[in-house]
Amino acid sequence: MSRLTRFTLATCAMIGVTAGIALAAAPTATTTAATAVTATTATLNGTVSPNGETTMYFFEYGTTTDYGTKTAPTEVKGNANDKAVSTDVTGLAPSTTYNYRIVATNASGTVNGANMTFTTPAPGPNANVISIATSNRVVRFGRPTTITGTLTGPNSAGAVVTLEENPAPYTGVFKSTGLTATTDATGKYSIVVSPPRNTKYRVSTGNGKDTTTSGEVTVRVRVKVTLGISDRTPSIGQRVRFAGHVTPGHDGKIARIQRRTAAGRWRTIATTTLVAASPVGSTPRSKYSKRIRINKNGTYRVRVAPADGDHIAGNSGRKSVVVH
């Protein structure tokens, strides 16, 4: 860099400072103490300095420093300075310690505030409490899981329980699924749901200030992978076509054709890229096809790992090939 260039840059910087012009930079974010903490709710607080650029902030929270839940992103204008921000969270579990932090991001970068904690108190002696569990935390696409739990406290029998959801990437707020159940004489309820993607669930009952909300459970959804083999008794050295579908569709992702080893592990012997296929109703599908030369007996499957946050890896059924 020439002396003239260095002088020009330095002069421009001095002029900007003198004129009060804010130079754009990554935001700063500071996590501050949570307030209004009850057995099931809290207000998360922090401060954000956008540093000259429009900035979005959100809070991450959960029972570990992996967090797992995010609040909806909120905008802070670029001309704000150390703006105090807050977000209310609900559906917390009583007598539980939560970790949380603020995250701020703009075009110049993303900054995480420091981790802080708060502990929810035990519910009052006359408060209702509702639990939640799921029969399967991992399901294949199209298959159901059963959400169950128990409402305890006054008038726990005959209460209407509403199932709420927050699908991946979990940045929105919980909304009703439209599915409900009525508690039995012992306060138990059961709701069957088939999540189309990775989804957090919770249940609530009551209205307004009298609403009782459960904690959260996460159900992860495997992609459905099918496998067809053109000839399962080929001649040695014959090329055999492996083909199938992946639901829901993940065009551009990789299908791994795998053979089981003598040690019981799965070894990838070929890969191919998923392409668009005809949908099933309103559900998009992808397809794959690959010809492979077969030289020995084996058990095969196809594995697809979307790695997109919406779904988790799925495997096809196993099929044997016997050469002759």
Image: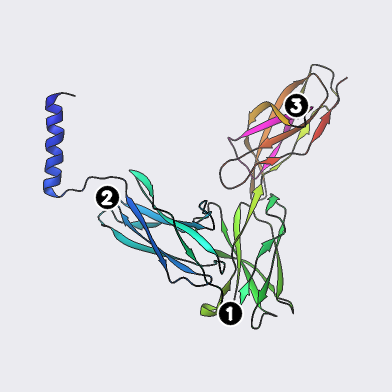
Q: What amino acid is labelled 3 in the image?
A: Arg
Q: Quadrant of the N terminus?
A: top left
In the picture of the structure, the residue carrying the numbered disc 1 is: 127
Q: Earlier in the sequence, mark 2 or mark 1?
A: 2
- Are the residues at dot 3 and dot 2 in contact (C-beta closer than 8 Å)? no
How was this image coloured?
rainbow
Q: Is residue 278 above or below residue 164?
A: above
Q: Which residue is labeled 3 in the image?
A: 241
What is the distance, in whole Å, between disc 3 and disc 2 at their CAs? 57 Å
Front residue of this view, candidates 113 and 211: 113
The mark that comes first in sequence, 3 or 2, is 2
Amino acid type of the residue tagged 1 in the rendering: Ala
The image position of residue 308, as x and y in percent, is 56, 43
Closer to the N terminus: mark 1 or mark 3?
Answer: 1
Q: Where is residue 225 in the image (x, y as percent from the top left)?
A: 71, 40
Q: Give, as a single range, the part of the protein colored magenta.
A: 241-262
Contact flag, marks 2 and 1 (Cβ < 8 Å): no
Q: Would residue 120 appear left or right of 148 to someone viewing this image?
A: left
Q: Which of marks 2 and 1 is in front?
A: 1
Alpha-carbon neighbours of circle 2 within 10 Å: few (<14), some, or many (≥20)? Answer: many
**Residue 230's mark?**
none
Q: Which of 187 and 297 is in front in this view?
A: 187
Q: Is residue 91 above or below residue 306?
A: below
Q: Give the quarter of the figure containing the C terminus.
A: top right
Disc number for residue 51:
2
Residue in the picture at 72% in, 73% down:
188
